[in-house]
């Protein structure tokens, strides 16, 4: 859950959330930052608060205020984690100095989770923050509301988008948990590359590894069908000798150019980088036959990324981004609205 060391900006404490016709009746203390919120909103979007706000012995009113509930931070797991508990005198040691992480990063992430509950806009600082937010939403049983708010947040977060490629594996896991189709599909495309060393091999989630492996097989089959189409055209087309020679030279030249770039571009690859090879072939100028090459290979070169600009990818030419990932291929029950 590591995040960058950029400046962290939280609104001044107390952070007061507004809802028409409602009075803030909950005070939350997250590492010294106070949140004034509404129990009805917390209960609606978080099963954790729905279950525990009114649990026997839990409510603690703050005298002289409208707050019916007063919750604060409790450090757990020997300083490795934290959670909100009722400040009712039964929670034990509430010294937050035992926390080993960055309390400001935690408070900022919690603020954004509450923003999601109130349908307020927020920006993701980097992929690490979304991974942290996902873990937080899991604990507070608020994954659906975070998922619904995520698309707008992602599109407003350039630093998050620029970091997606390097964190594609971790984000694919988060996207599955959040059941977020757009993020999942983009991350799956990224995990299928680069061609010689696809990132999905790093996955520990066996279901995701199976989904990615199936997608890789579909991609390989598409490559085979494209190559088959070209070979068929070469074998059955009535082309002049000049064209046949040009086709052979074009393929030879493309292979040679890919091999020449092998050492400094494909250092970890153990095979020919097929995306690079076909792009070189598409760049070749082969009279008459070039249309057959384009018809066969251009579908593989389509860009189906919806969140990030493919031109900004590192080693862009080493990726096939044209595979169609269907909604029915997503590894969760899409009829569920609560999970």
Image (tube, helix red, strand yellow):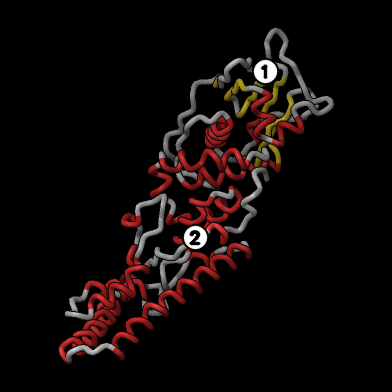
Tag 2: Cα neighbours inside 10 Å, few (<14), some, or many (≥20)? many
Q: Name the residue: 35% across, 52% down.
A: 309
Q: Residue furthest top?
A: 64
Q: Quadrant of residue 297?
A: bottom left
Residue 90 can be seen in this image: yes
**Residue that numbered label 1 is attached to:** 25
In the drawing, does residue 148 fall left or right of residue 303? right
Residue 11: x and y in percent read: 49, 24
Residue 136 can be seen in this image: no
In the drawing, does residue 60 fall left or right of residue 102? right
Secondary structure under tag 2 reads: helix
Tag 1: Cα neighbours inside 10 Å, few (<14), some, or many (≥20)? some
Q: Quadrant of residue 301?
A: bottom left
Q: Residue furthest right?
A: 56
271 up-or-down from 40: above or below: below
Q: Quadrant of residue 265?
A: bottom left
Q: In this view of the protein, which residue sits in the foreground, 122 or 307?
A: 307
**Residue that numbered label 2 is attached to:** 188
Q: Name the residue: 60% across, 29% down.
A: 31
108 up-or-down from 165: above or below: above
- Measure the C-alpha gap from mark 2 to mark 1: 43 Å
Residue 105: x and y in percent read: 53, 36
Q: Earlier in the sequence, mark 2 or mark 1?
A: 1
Secondary structure under tag 1 reads: loop
Residue 22: x and y in percent read: 63, 16
């Amino acid at each position: 859950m590591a995040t960058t060391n950029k400046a962290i900006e939280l609104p001044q404490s107390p952070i007061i959330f507004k809802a028409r016709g409602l009075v803030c009746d909950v005070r939350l203390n997250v590492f010294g930052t106070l949140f004034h919120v509404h129990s009805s909103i917390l209960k609606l979007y978080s099963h954790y608060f729905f279950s525990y706000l009114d649990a026997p012995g839990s409510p603690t009113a703050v005298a002289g205020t409208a707050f019916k509930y007063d919750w604060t931070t409790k450090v757990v797991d020997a300083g490795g984690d934290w959670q909100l508990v009722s400040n009712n005198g039964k929670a034990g040691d509430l010294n937050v100095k035992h926390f080993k992480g960055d309390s400001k990063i935690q408070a900022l992430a919690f603020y954004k989770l509450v923003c999601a509950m109130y349908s307020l806009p927020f920006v993701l600082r980097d992929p690490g923050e979304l991974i942290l937010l996902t873990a937080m939403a899991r604990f507070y049983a608020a994954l659906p509301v975070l998922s619904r708010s995520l698309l707008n947040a992602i599109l407003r977060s350039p630093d998050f988008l620029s970091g997606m490629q390097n964190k594609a594996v971790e984000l694919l896991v988060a996207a599955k948990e959040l059941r977020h189709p757009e993020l999942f599909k983009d991350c799956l495309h990224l995990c299928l590359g680069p061609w010689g060393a696809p990132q999905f091999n790093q996955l520990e989630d066996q279901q995701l590894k199976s989904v990615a492996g199936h997608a890789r097989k579909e991609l390989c089959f598409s490559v085979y069908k494209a190559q088959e189409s070209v070979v068929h055209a070469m074998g059955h087309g009535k082309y002049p000798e000049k064209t046949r020679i040009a086709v052979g030279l074009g393929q030879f030249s493309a292979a040679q150019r890919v091999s020449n770039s092998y050492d400094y571009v494909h250092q970890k690859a153990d095979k020919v980088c097929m995306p690079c090879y076909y792009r070189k072939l598409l760049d070749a100028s082969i009279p008459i036959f070039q249309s057959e090459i384009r018809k066969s290979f251009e579908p593989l070169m389509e860009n189906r990324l919806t969140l990030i600009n493919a031109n900004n990818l590192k080693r862009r030419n080493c990726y096939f981004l044209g595979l169609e990932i269907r909604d029915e291929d997503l590894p969760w029950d899409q009829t569920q609205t609560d999970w």
